[in-house]
Image (cartoon, rainbow, N blue to C red):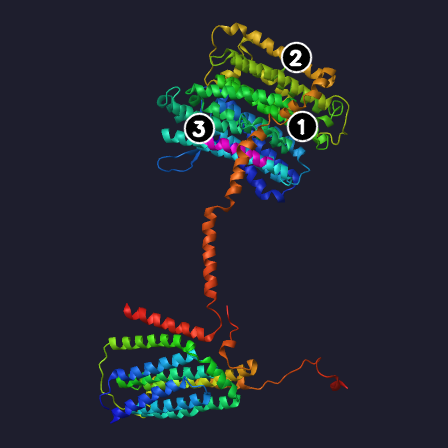
Amino acid sequence: MDNIPMETGFIIAGILFTLGLTGVMIRRNVIFMLMSIEIMLNAAGLAFVFAGSFWQQADGQVMFIFILAVAAAEVSVGLALIILIYQKFKTLDVDKLSKMKG
Amino acid sequence: MHSLIEWIVLLPFAGFLILSVLGKYLNKNLIGATGVGSVGISALLTFIVGAGFLAQPTQIFTVSIWRWFDVAGFHPQIAFHIDSLSVVFIFVITFVGFLIHLYSAEFMKDDDGYARFFAYMNLFVGSMLVLVLADNLLLLYLGWEGVGLCSFLLIGFWYKEPDNAAAARKAFIVTRVGDTAMAIGLFLLFYHFNTLDIRTLLGEIPGQWEMGSPLATTAAFLLLGGAVGKSAQLPLQTWLPDAMAGPSPVSALIHAATMVTAGVYLIARMHILFIQSPMVMMVIAIVGAATLLIAGFSALAQYDIKKVLAYSTISQIGYMFLALGVGAWSAAIFHFMIHAFFKALLFLGAGAVILAMHHEHDMFKMGGLKKQLPVTFWTFLIGSASLAALPLVTAGFYSKDEILWYAWAGERGGVWLWLAGIVGALITAVYTFRMIFITFYGEQKTEVHQKPGVLIKIPLVVLAILSLVGGFINLPHNFGHFDLFSQFVTRTLPGIEIDGEVESLEWVMQLISAVLALVGVYLAYVFYLKRSSVYEDISAKATVLKKFLLYGWSFDALYDKLFVVPVVTLARINKGDFIDFVYTGIANINLFFNGLLSKTQNGNVRWYIMGIAFGAIVLIAIIFTL
Amino acid sequence: MLNVLFYTAATIGVIATFMVITRYHAVHALLYFVVSLLSIAVVFYVIGAPFIAALEVIIYAGAIMTLFIFVIMMLNLGAATIDQERTWLTPKIWVGPSVLTLILLIQFLLVMFNTGLQGNEMMVIEPKEVGVSLFTQYLLAVELAGMLLLAGIVGAYHLGKRKKKILHRYLETKEDHG
């Protein structure tokens, strides 16, 4: 490995994370929101792996594995819920799902 | 014998505790026995203590039970002090109290609140004993407040009627005005002398405050305010006629014999303070004279039998105040004792009549009871004769006559005070026998419902005997110097000097008062029994005057306009005041922000996420700049 | 040379992610996401985590994204949703959030550059090392992750089950009772 400076990885992770956050905030379709959340999870994992290789330990990669497991479980349940939402409301507009307003 | 004094006071309190805690579990006989017995044993102990006291002429002693508190050098004790003045008072309180308790054992036996009644009565007797036996003014004030409380509880005994509760409240509030004045007087005394112990005060006052000094006058005025409130004198006399809403034994005990004389006791006890300010003495005499006239005239127009007696009480206490004001201390105390006897008798008799007339109070609906209720009639007649001071045979003659004599002849007396007393005596005779003739003579308008039993008759008879012979222990000077009572009382209170060489004119004064009493009886006979046409004419034309007198010279209406209406108006104007505005303002601000913030909870997920992002920005900014 | 590879892959990843969030058609966005994931996998490989690179491709791009695509195909949304997306993604909508996240990004960068880190050499970390660490040091977490996945499976099954409509017996037709 050559001299890739430390900060580059974190910059990349930061950019990806903010892109994902922007995606969650501006999209109105539920599926796109879920996708943007996946982007964020992936970016966080990237940061972990970078840090792990910086400290030359395996802990970063272990963390990434757990993040992966969490993302998998969350996506499966989330998509099942999306299917139910579509069956009930006949639309995927997240603004229509505002029954919990104060 | 020292230890017996504590029991005199503690037994009624013990009776109160037993009856208030266990009252609903005991049967009626046991309640009656406890209530009457506690006061009865107190009376017995009083006799023993009094006898022992009389045997040793110059002894006074103090019994201290415990130290009440000790703050910054001020340590009042719960201590009882016996001297000749307090012996007279406790004798009257316990003995007349015992007779009244005996009477109420039968009078109140059909009432549901039997135990409550005796509990309150015992508490009253206990508080009054504390008041007269107190060693220091703070303990006296405790007793003072205690009797005020019991008066409230007992006037409003039948509290389910709103009128009774209103009368009880009126009594308490009006006497409160006096109590506050007295409290301020106590503060003043404490501030200057750093103690409220009566012996110490009486010793130090002549030294520190010279005769007529403004401080002495102020303190005396304030204490007078308290006395005026409790004794229902001008200007605080409006509560006593309304207090007749309570049961008759209550009126007899509290508003005839004991509580209303607490003011007399206070002035007599603190006599040195009052002597130090002659102006206040004159005010006392004038208050007494004015009150006795006002109340006497008001009694002429009443038709409720108990209200006649109420106004009569106010009037007689006016006589006592008159005596105190001119410096005739022992005469005032003598009249107190005799008045206790005959006024209690009259109230108890009125209660028997009311019971017989099935709770009818209006005299004009009674009549012809002379044959139906003989014992009641004769005892009532004796009591009225004593009240009207019929000459030579009744005790009232001796006591009232002594006051009138000193009002004329005493060094602080004067002819105007004597004239007021004499006119008052005439009016007293007129209204007293008016009451007798309307109630007991004439044709019967209501059927007799229930004749009195033995427990009612015994106190009536005993008190009637005392009203007759009680005066013989202190005959006037020209009947022979048989003045046991004055000798006894002047061990504690000063005597009185007679102005000038008028001692030989005493018999003239006695003749005048005797003649006037008989003239009053005759007038009452002419107006109310024979119903002469002159009376009918005057009575028909004088409706305005009658109404004015009926309402006690309209003091209630005056106070209503002076005090009640402005305060109520101010309270109405101030209903939406700015202090409330502050509190409701806080609530309104909260509501406003609640409205604002609840708009952010619109259920929109993207809005929430934006909130999270914003929060993250702020948090990172804070954490990494600090 | 690895440097060049690293920077190229990183750039492709960023551009692809940007395309993900701005597409109107769901499947287009998903495909761009897959591209992004693959380029990130290359990045992982370059910095010395080959095991993770493999996992990224297999699980993230291969399983999770496939699941997404299947669900979108099942929902069968049609062309109307694409027009809907066009109306929903106006400049008015994305200006505010973009500014917010830009500020957040600047904050991240500032924080990172102010905490002085000095870089070590990056070494390759073998899969064996990762495995040893997983099953000795982080054994409990592995078990928990397993349980989490189990819960996810059960939940997804239950939510996706087709429910039978059950009528109250009084609402049934009379022919059952002759």
Name the subunit of mark 3. Answer: B
- Closer to the camera: disc 3 or disc 1? 1
- Image location (x, y in percent) of residue B585: 46, 53
| Of the pair B341 and B18, the residue shown nearer to us | B341
The mark nearer the N terminus, 3 or 1, is 3
Residue placed under numbered mark 3 in the picture: B62
Query: Residue B534, image x and y in percent?
Result: 72, 15
Q: Are marks 3 and 1 in contact (CB under 8 Å)?
A: no
The numbered mark, 2 or 1, whose residue comes first in the sequence reads 1
The residue tagged with tag 1: helix, strand or loop? loop
B611 is within the stretch colored magenta: no
Magenta span includes B179: yes
Residue C78 in the image: x percent, y percent?
Answer: 52, 88
- Separation of marks 3 and 1 at Cα, in angstroms: 45 Å
| Three-letter amino acid code at the position of disc 2 | Val
Count of marks, rendered view: 3
Label 2 element class: helix
Give left or right: position of B277 versus B369: left
Q: Which mark is residue B304?
A: 1
Circle number at residue C41: none
Contact check, label 2 and label 3, Cβ < 8 Å: no
Q: Which residue is mark 2?
A: B519
Magenta range? B167-182
